[in-house]
Amino acid sequence: MRTTLDLGGRWTWSVDETGPTPVPAEARSLIGREIDAHVPGALHADLLAAGVIPDPLVDSNEDLVGWVSRCDWLLRRRIDRPVDAERIDLVFDGIDTVAAVAVNGHTLGTVRNMHRTARFDVSSVIADDTLVEVRFTSPYTEAEKWERELGARPSAYPEPFAFIRKMASSFGWDWGPTLPGCGLWRDVRLEAWSTARISAVRPLVDVFEDTGILTAHIDLERAASGDALPLHLEVDVAGHAVHVEVPPGESTATVVVDVPDVRRWFPRSLGEPHTYPVAISLWAHGERLDQRDTRVGFRTISVDRTPDDLGTPFVVTVNDRPLFIRGVNWIPESVFPGTVPAERVRARLEQAADANVDLVRVWGGGVYESDEFYDACDDLGLLVWQDFLFACAAYPEEEPIRSEVLAEARENIVRLSPHASLALWNGNNENLWMRFDKDWAAQPGGDLTWGDRYYLEWLPDLVRELDPTRPYTEGSPWSGDGVVDPNDVDHQTFHSWDAWNEDDYAVYRDSAPRFVSEFGWQGAATWRTLRDAITDDELRLDSDNVRHHQKAIDGHTKIARNLARHLPATADFDRWHLQTQWMQVEAVRTGVLHWRSNWPRTAGTIVWQLNDLWPVTSWSAIDSAGRCKPLYFAIRDMYAPRVMTIEPTDGGLELCIINDHDETWVGSARIMRRRVDGEVLADRTEPVSVAPRSVIRLDLPETLAESADRSSEFLAATLDGERALWCFASPRMPGASAPLDIAVTAVPGGLDIVVSSDGLARDILVQPDRIHPAATVDRGFTTVLPGESATFRVRAPERLDPEAARGAFVVSSLRDIIDPD
């Protein structure tokens, strides 16, 4: 039976003087010094723990540690030979990135791809007290070498990430620092085995009527003693077992198992995510040689891209049921992905599920995520849109990069194939669009290869070969061919960034794209997260450290321009911080609710972005400390299965009622026009019946839609506890929000903060991290109507002082955002 020995834990780092990169001046004092390393892990994290470098995520320390990425490093440890076996393999699940692996001074091989595994036969060289060494070449040395040899090409960022198969965003992005490191970022182990082993399993599923069909493609590796033997495979799916014989010399087998009366896997918005255990065992002479345990979910999935009178739709369909996708984009949880524990990944995905999200897009500038990531998505009923790892650059198609890309894609298609959550393969992020939109062909290097053969030929060929059960799209965005603008609103997927970069979020309402796979709006990280990352005595907008934690080009300028359209200017950091949170929510809510109201023309939105990898002002809903920004709660509310929105039309206003349930929504919608002091000016009740998975739109009569005094009137529509508001007053108008009455009560686990008002109190927010670093709250911006109240439940791991809730900016509202007094 195959046995494994985990080689994680303590290793040691040292500067590699023998590598191709000259030792930086900052590293010379470290020559000959051994530094504790943790595997899996990352170089920067180990240097920080050893006191060699300051925290690169604090202040502007990123700039002080740039030398780390410009140095070659040696990682080593001693191991003993495991049990005797015919074969002993040294297996690395992830080496970041360019390295030579040696055992007792004998070089086993070299690697140059973070996204692949590496396996070396060490049977003849391993003994007790064996020295394992991994010599890392600086990622810049490798990337710049191939950039020189193959020719520089257009890119959105001035870094050579397109010339190395490494997490692109480790070289910096418009939300992330430039900290490309190295290390063993996934597990490393010894595997001892004899005769034969299972080298890969690719279980593909289909459903015919009530029968689940598992087609397991199994690859085997034989040792010398197994070459002439017949081998036996058993594939068991929840008690339904099939046995096959693999003739001598054969190394592949396909086993089909039928599962009657199957329970299908559904995304959380359609049903239950049911999975089945799968056990695959390999036998010879009655002895079990190896076993692989996995699981599958039986479901069908497709994307309807049949041209219609409006253009080309992009409707995701699971088990023959079309659905509006309520998605979020996912970036790596850390700029050092080897340091991210599995429980943190699961917690973040649980937060997404709790926010009514049903799809997570794994973005192409990151990594193929861990098995634990996809396991959690399987469990939670979260569909996964998986990018191949290309983003925002022209990628060379020459060797050695081409072979690495195709081997990486092949390996990861096979690795991820068991996961029911995996719904869609996507060729790239924005490369087809940027080639057109940025006129890359006319730029230096624009006449060189740029990656189109990956997206249009090689990757779709691999998906058809290895995973024909899932749809493939050439890119995001992509219109479907090379004739129509890749980012055409009427054809397939669309990225909406002009609003943030140039216009106002109101322009979201000007169109109804077929599928919005990226859009977003910036807001600062939570106050405590920024406070912990910036050591200035006082947080100020003009602080170098504050500005360092904004990576978007002209990011603060764009924020200021966008804020000026809706709110009065402020130089006060706390008020500015609150304003960015408010505007982020307003902008994203405007887009999502407008586009949801246009179902089925618009078939989904994927908000940029769910998470962050360092403390920063960015587009995220959850910051890098795991704290929920107000946007998180807004996503939860706007992605609710049943929601209403009041939308402007050419002639007035209309009430849109969105029912994403399987049952008809029947009730009476009440719409009132009221003064901010509570007086009812007009009142109307409309009986409604909204069919499952549909939207109805009610034109509002002039008595409701026309305001005599825009500064003091608003609309409120209610239906079965759901509510939609429309304020005629601009947020900056005096009297737009009334004073608050606040009552604070200590309760087990924290505080209940009850906020009420005699008038309309718009956009009340409680910032729990201003009370305690670990405190949480159960809601974001909340509007209280005249005479009503709202309870904010603040919880923390220790007792909270009720008086702390009365501190500055703990409880605030739109009134505080616009009024410095």
Image (tube, grey):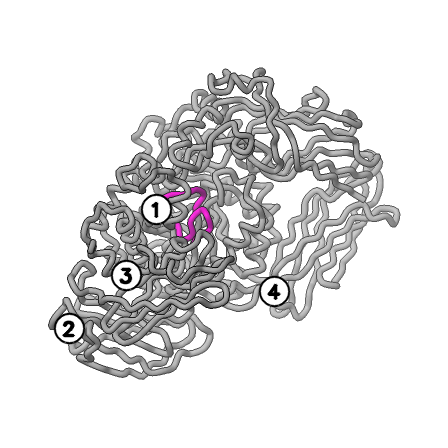
Q: Which residues are magenta?
A: 612-627
Q: Using the image, tell me which numbered label, if any, was put on residue 274.
A: 4
Indicate the position of residue 144 as horizontal and vertical percent values. 45, 23
Q: Residue at 67% of width from left, 53% of height from top? A: 294
Q: Which residue is mark 3?
A: 813
User: Considering only order in the chain, which callout, 3 or 4, is on the residue closer to the N terminus?
Assistant: 4
Residue type, label 1:
Pro
Q: Are marks 2 and 4 in contact (CB under 8 Å)?
A: no
Q: Nearer the viewer, mark 1 or mark 2?
A: 2
Q: Nearer the viewer, mark 4 or mark 1?
A: 4
User: Considering only order in the chain, which callout, 3 or 2, is on the residue closer to the N terminus?
Assistant: 2
Which residue is the extreme one toward the right? 285
Q: Which residue is mark 1?
A: 486
Q: Using the image, tell me which numbered label, if any, was put on residue 789.
A: none
Indicate the position of residue 402 as horizontal and vertical percent values. 51, 32
Instruction: Tell me, yes or no, if residue 110 can be seen here.
Output: no
Q: Secondary structure at mark 1?
A: loop
Instruction: Tell me, yes or no, if residue 344 can be seen here.
Output: yes
Q: Nearer the viewer, mark 4 or mark 3?
A: 3
Q: Which residue is mark 2?
A: 706
Q: Is residue 613 magenta?
A: yes
Q: Is residue 598 left or right of residue 16?
A: left
Residue type, label 3:
Ser
